[in-house]
Amino acid sequence: MFHFVLRRLASAVPTLFIVVTLSFFLMRFAPGGPFNLERPLPPATMENLMKAYHLDQPLWNQYLQYLKNAITGDFGPSYIYKDNTIAELIGKGLPYSITLGSYALLLALFGGVIIGTIAALRQNSFLDFLIMSIATVGVTVPNFVVGPVLTLVFAVLLSLLPAGGWGDGSWRFLILPMIALALPQLAVFARLTRGSMIEGLHTDHIRTARAYGLPPRVVVITHAMRGALLPVVSYLAPCAAALLTGSAVVESIFTIPGVGRYFVLGAINRDYTLVMGTVVLVAIFVIVFNLLVDILYGLLDPRVRHD
């Protein structure tokens, strides 16, 4: 297991290198720049800004300098948020994104597994069709539609919950963005669990367990659930990375000062370093969660061994 982890961490280095390289050049080749305003700056001011941020140097030199600094954890200053480095901005926004994302991940995972299991045990019944219909709606309706609808109903019409903001971080402020963030992932988990659970309930070892007279609850939870969770675990890595690093749409709708909101503002304002910092952060989360999922996969499936 130790050697497996080392191999995966070693393979993460070229992955991060490719992500950083593609992101750097795609951002620089995009039209516009961080100091292109509706009212153009005087040429002398623009020249001083470009020189101060080393944007007057050749692109290959900027790239090599960025790689050198990124290795040490220095992602440079923000072009838009004056007197702030990218590390400081991420440090400010990441706790909000992780808190909201953790609750959304727990809701999506446990809610999706429970609902999917119920649908599988009632296959082709009215309850099954109802659950899968709702799950299909959850997958197809995007966050930027769900968020405003929740705000309109529960904040404006019913006045039960705040319309946005972080406030004191209590549940009243977290419920609406948590539901908007978790709903699409909950629907995916439900569909994955239903499909794998139906397949698992028709396998030979489940028939054998039933033939031995084991209670249905034991058959489902102890035997069938273990195999049914494998597709769920496979999807868990990208889902967790996306939720824990913040949803750009949800954080913007509910004005939550998380990393996702910084990514949107950085992309709009062509803040190269801010966008690069958030992309690298997401890439690191994906790599780490993929490693954890591979380890968990081996614990759930005895046929998988990490030597």
Image (spheres, grey):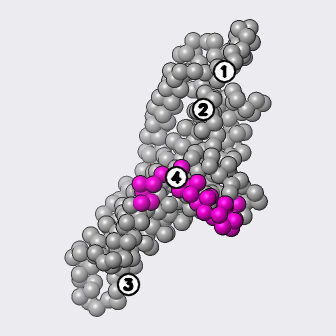
Residue at the extreme left of the image, as rendered? 204
Q: Are marks 2 and 1 in contact (CB under 8 Å)?
A: no
Quadrant housing residue 57: top right
Instruction: Identify residue type, mark 3.
Output: Val
Q: Are marks 3 and 1 in contact (CB under 8 Å)?
A: no
Amino acid type, callout 1? Glu
- Nearer the viewer's eye, disc 4 or disc 3? 4
Left/right of residue 278 with respect to residue 18 in the rendered view: right
Residue under label 1, please give it.
38
* Residue at 31% in and 78% down: 125
Give the residue displayed 66% in from the left and 21% down from the top.
38
User: In the figure, 22 relative to 39: above or below?
Assistant: below
The residue lying at 57 percent from left, 47 percent from top is 249
First along the sequence among labels 4 and 3: 4
Q: Which residue is mark 2?
A: 268
Residue 42 visible within the image: yes
**Residue at image mark 3:** 218
Helix, strand or loop at mark 4: helix
On the image, the x and y values in percent for residue 127 come to: 37, 77
Counting residues from the start of the chain, the first of labels 2 and 4 encountered is 4
* Crowding at mark 1 (Cα within 10 Å: few <14, some 14-19, many 20+): few
What is the CA distance from the residue labelled 2 to the residue labelled 4?
21 Å
Magenta-colored stretch includes residue 138:
yes
Q: Earlier in the sequence, mark 3 or mark 2?
A: 3
Q: Which residue is mark 4?
A: 145
Q: Position of residue 34 (x, y in %)?
A: 64, 23
Q: Say which of marks 2 and 4 sits in front.
A: 4
Q: Position of residue 266 (x, y in %)?
A: 62, 33
Q: Which residues are magenta?
A: 137-162
Pick whichever of labels 3 and 1 is earlier in the sequence.
Answer: 1
Q: CA distance from mark 2 to mark 1?
A: 13 Å
